[in-house]
Image: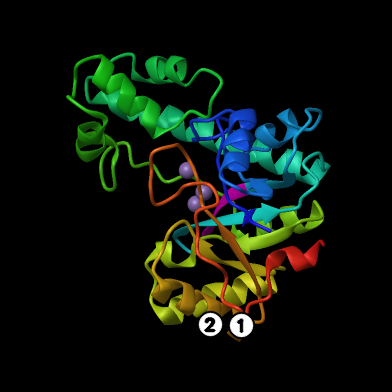
Amino acid sequence: MVFDLHSHSTASDGSLSPQALVDRARQQGVKQLAITDHDSVDGVLALQHSPVDIGLIAGVELSCVWGKVLIHIVGLNIDPRAEVMARGLQQQQQARQQRACVIGQKLEKLGFSGAAEGARQLAGDSQLGRPHFARFLVEQGYVASENEAFKKYLGAGKAGDVKLMWPALHTVVSWIVDAGGVAVLAHPLHYRMTATKLRALITDFRQAGGLAVEVINGRQSADKTRTLGDLARRFDLLASLGSDFHRPGAPWSELGMMGDLPRDCVPVWSAWE
Ligand code: MN
Ligand code: MN
Ligand code: MN
């Protein structure tokens, strides 16, 4: 059984439509795929009535804060139509819109007129975010590349680096639990915390009702896998794994291309199988 329990479609910042994502997953030998778009279940819902010849697990990746740190929590095997999830996702959407407004205002103040409207048009039906502002700046000739746009105006510490008012960790975990799913702490080593702080985070996450930790996220060193596997065991958490696939051509995150979970970990799918 090849599980890939972390992937993105055009419902968030992925480049493949939900159907194309499933097709590619099948080609890559994935048997069970979770679509976990940022703050959206639209990709999951889009496939609910189409014939799909691999196992699909309804998922989501929710942004939240723990203290001042932005954390991602993946929800697996949720009911994508649960009322509590719909309300939560609506709230996340509003937070994103507000943030885009503030970024737009800041860029306009810097002299980039039409930034707010331009980015909104570029986003179309997809989630409006900093990449759209970057593209706007490139297309208007203000910068040579999206990379430069992030370096000068959108990246950490720059005008467009607007911190959102995301909900607290325990709030998004409760949405997942109430929607019948399993809450997974995504990519624990991406937050660049000290080991002590990470243990405190995991303790709070467990208290909030979190059940699993992502032991494998894309292609990573055996060292990382061991560290995270140990952490899962120490805190008596289930272990998840996923590619965090966004688009073809990124060799560190191809669908289904990951190492195996350490043998002494309890896989997260034991919670619903
Ligand atoms: Mn993403
Ligand atoms: Mn993430
Ligand atoms: Mn992700």
Asked whether 188 or 273 is in front, the reply is 273
Q: Secondary structure at mark 2?
A: helix
Residue in the picture at 50% in, 54% down: 257
Label number found at residue 233:
1
Q: Secondary structure at mark 1?
A: helix
For the question of whether residue 39 can be seen, the reply is no
Residue in the picture at 22% in, 25% down: 110
Query: Is residue 258 placed above or below 236 in the rendered structure?
Result: above
Mark 2 sits near ligand 2, with its Cβ under 8 Å away: no
- Per the rendered image, the range of residues in magenta is 61-66
Q: Quadrant of residue 250?
A: top left
Asked whether 122 or 218 is in front, the reply is 218
Q: Residues within 10 Å of mark 1 (few under 14, many from 20)?
A: some
Q: Residues within 10 Å of mark 2 (few under 14, many from 20)?
A: some
Quarter of the picture containing the C terminus is bottom right
**Residue 230 location in percent, x, y?**
53, 82
Quarter of the picture containing the N terminus is bottom right
Q: Amino acid at mark 1?
A: Arg
The residue tagged 2 is 230
Q: Quadrant of residue 139?
A: top left
Asked whether 269 or 115 is in front, the reply is 269
Residue contact at pointers 1 and 2, CB within 8 angstroms: yes
Q: Amino acid at mark 2?
A: Asp
**Residue 111 location in percent, x, y?**
22, 20
For the question of whether residue 159 can be seen, the reply is yes
